[in-house]
Amino acid sequence: MDIAVSRLLQQAAQARQSGWVAQGEQLLAQVLRLAPKEPQALNLAGLLALDKGEFKSARDYFLAATAADPGEAALWMNLAAAERGLNHRDAERSALQAAIDIDQRNLMAQIRMAQLLQRLGEGQGAVESWGKALALSAGTLDLPPALADMLAKGRDYVCEHQADFAKRIETGVADLLDQADPTARRRFQACLDREFGRRTIYQNQCSGLHYPFLPAEEYFDRHHFPWMEALEAQTDIIRAEFLAMLAGVDGAVRPYVRQEPGTPQNKWTMLHDSLDWGAAFLWEYGVRNEAVCAACPQTVAALEALPRADIAGRAPSAFFSLLRPKSRIPAHTGVTNSRAIIHLPLIVPPDCYFRVGGETRNWQEGVAFAFDDTIEHEAWNESDHLRVVLIFDVWNPHLSLAEQQLLKQFYAAVDARKMTDTMLDI
């Protein structure tokens, strides 16, 4: 661009910004006489026409500008604005698409396309465009209020559209879903919830041994544990033994969380050496606590009748878990998915909750359940009373008997190797 033309064009643009429209038009007229095909001059002429609501004239200028410089997205955006003023929806769409084709990351082009498709009633297309705009703006700080408002409305539209879509789909499958067995219902509902953005699907996170290809189930189905009903029938006896033990055995309950000296602050710091979360162990990593077991003989008999894992130095574990009022156990994951954790609730005041993955439950006294503790889980007691649950581990029900035996032999070999290494060190 010629220096003189460039200077005149800059002055014309400044005049427009300052509100001196007549002066801007005079300067621009000089530019167009000198450079009638200069795209920036044609663009400024279109903007001046837009300012006055002269949409047809603006469109003509912008068409000439895009013909002169088809690779400039801003020119196509301005053309789309003129076509919108003329209610030329197809032409507006084409202009916006041209801007997007130049740069898929053009936030305003994606927003304007979403708004257009919304006006046209093309719901799915509008949702997709809003989704792109929301993704582009994610993490951006200090958005201008007008832009933030547009994005908020877009987010609301997406949520409303998805809710309506989900309702239609769920209505379509409702009859068949009602006829399905509990396992199929639970899993298919999780599928729907994930598809419609209503929940996250959590994966196993094992701090120890991870056994591949086992289903990552948050809560296991009861049919895997045919002995569960018989255990539940002994809830009153187990609760009574716990209460008697609590009153009669000094030091039976100790803090569940005990960290090594010098451990940096972490999510467990608040529970370190605290009886806010206390435990009275019957077995701990396969080691029997004689005092607690002696005080709870019928509880011990009930547990010993179950098909628990028996791995020296590792399993079984069984304990009474005590969560004080207004206390919380932070979200965490366990050691290995080769086991399932059983809860038998004994004392459950209102406002006590337990979450595994994407499902939160209220404990119910005497109603046992099993879950995979390598899926993120947490617990909280918002009541003014103590919550007590009997907790113990069993084999993951998806492991075959042969796999259980292989795992026991694996751990025996590991421990034997460690013992050999220790002896060599000595």
Image (spheres, rainbow, N blue to C red):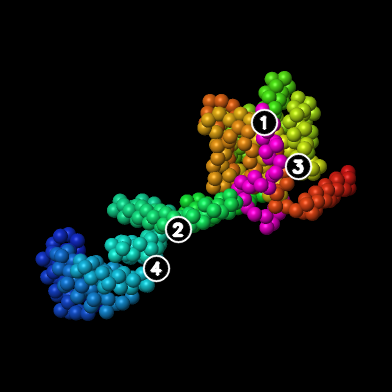
Please identify the quarter of the rendering in which residue 244 is found: top right
Magenta stretch? 207-236
For the C terminus, the image quarter is top right
Q: For the residue labelled by badge 1, is the local secondary structure a helix, a strand or a loop?
A: helix
Q: Please give the label number shown on residue 235.
A: 1
Q: Is residue 414 visible?
A: no
Residue hosting label 2:
172
Tally of numbered tags: 4
Q: Is residue 216 visible?
A: yes
In three-dimensional space, the C-alpha distance between marks 2 and 3, rounded to whole angstroms, equals: 43 Å
Q: What amino acid type should be assigned to the residue bearing mark 3? A: Arg
* Of the two numbered discs 1 and 3 in the rendering, the one whose residue sits closer to the viewer: 1
In three-dimensional space, the C-alpha distance between marks 1 and 4, rounded to whole angstroms, equals: 62 Å
Tag 4 or tag 1, which sits nearer the N-term?
4
Q: What amino acid type should be assigned to the residue bearing mark 4? A: Gln
Tag 3 or tag 4, which sits nearer the N-term?
4
Q: Is residue 71 left or right of residue 248?
A: left
Residue hosting label 4:
104
- Magenta region includes residue 218: yes
* Of the two numbered discs 2 and 4 in the rendering, the one whose residue sits closer to the viewer: 2
Residue hosting label 3:
308
